[in-house]
């Protein structure tokens, strides 16, 4: 088998040219692989989110983290090796958790459920924007991605105004 007939080698040699042509999506044997990261990182990289929208998104990520609502840990927690490392007063910590949960419920109640689901799926769960945006008005990759971005911008702007966040 020569170099030209090995499909894996040909894919590796043409990977940069393919990525330049098709963006961050690579199609191999009918399966799409996304090398572009999460919708949030792409939107930040292309400057499609304003500073106030980014502030609102960071605020929501912090609330989800405080409330104990987060994804699977990426690495192990190494603070437990040293007694008391990273620990705070349990009463203060429980008060912060309850406050964050109350804030999340209050903020979520302000928005129609489909809008909140798109915002949460794109920001917290890193769902591809095309999938999240398709839940509003059907599927079409470019338009669904644009719908998801518009909804995330709308919700983030409202959160920034309602929570009186200052950039």
Image (cartoon, rainbow, N blue to C red):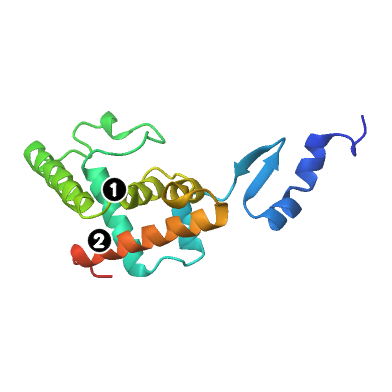
Secondary structure category for the residue under label 2: helix
Please give the name of the residue rendered at 37% of the width and 58% of the height, measured from the top-left corner: 152
Residue 140 image point, x, y percent: 55, 52
Question: Seen in the image, is 2 located left or right of residue 65?
Answer: right
Instruction: Place residue 157 in its image quadrant.
Output: bottom left
Instruction: Place residue 56 in its image quadrant.
Output: bottom left
Q: Is residue 15 above or below residue 52?
A: above
Secondary structure category for the residue under label 1: helix
Farthest residue to the front: give it: 137
Instruction: Place residue 27 in its image quadrant.
Output: top right
Q: Is residue 152 above or below residue 132?
A: below
| Pointer 2 residue | 159
Please give the name of the residue rendered at 34% of the width and 64% of the height, measured from the top-left corner: 53
Label 2 environment density (alpha carbons within 10 Å; few <14, some 14–19, many ≥20):
many
Residue 33 image point, x, y percent: 62, 41
| Pointer 1 residue | 113
Q: Is residue 73 above or below residue 47?
A: above
Residue 16 image point, x, y percent: 72, 52
Please give the name of the residue rendered at 78% of the width and 35% of the height, measured from the top-left corner: 8
Question: Seen in the image, is 45 located left or right of residue 52?
Answer: right
Farthest residue to the right: give it: 2
* Label at residue 103: none
The residue lying toward the viewer, choosing from 7 and 82, is 7
Residue 121 image point, x, y percent: 38, 45
Kindly report which numbered mark, 1 or 2, lies closer to the viewer in this rendering.
Answer: 1
Q: Is residue 51 above or below residue 61?
A: below
């Amino acid at each position: 088998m020569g170099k030209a007939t090995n499909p894996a080698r040909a894919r590796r040699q043409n990977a940069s040219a393919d990525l330049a042509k098709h963006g961050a999506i690579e199609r191999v044997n009918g399966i799409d692989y996304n090398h572009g990261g999460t919708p949030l990182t792409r939107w930040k990289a292309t400057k499609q989110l304003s500073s106030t929208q980014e502030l609102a998104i960071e605020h929501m990520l912090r609330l989800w983290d405080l409330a104990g609502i987060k994804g699977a840990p990426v690495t192990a927690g190494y603070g437990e090796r040293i007694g008391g490392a990273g620990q705070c007063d349990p009463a203060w910590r429980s008060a912060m958790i309850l406050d964050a949960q109350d804030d999340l419920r209050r903020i979520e109640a302000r928005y129609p459920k489909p809008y909140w689901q798109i915002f949460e799926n794109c920001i917290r769960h890193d769902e591809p924007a095309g999938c999240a945006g398709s839940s509003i008005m059907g599927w079409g990759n470019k338009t669904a991605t644009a719908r998801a971005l518009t909804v995330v911008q709308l919700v983030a702007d409202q959160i920034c105004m309602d929570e009186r966040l200052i950039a």
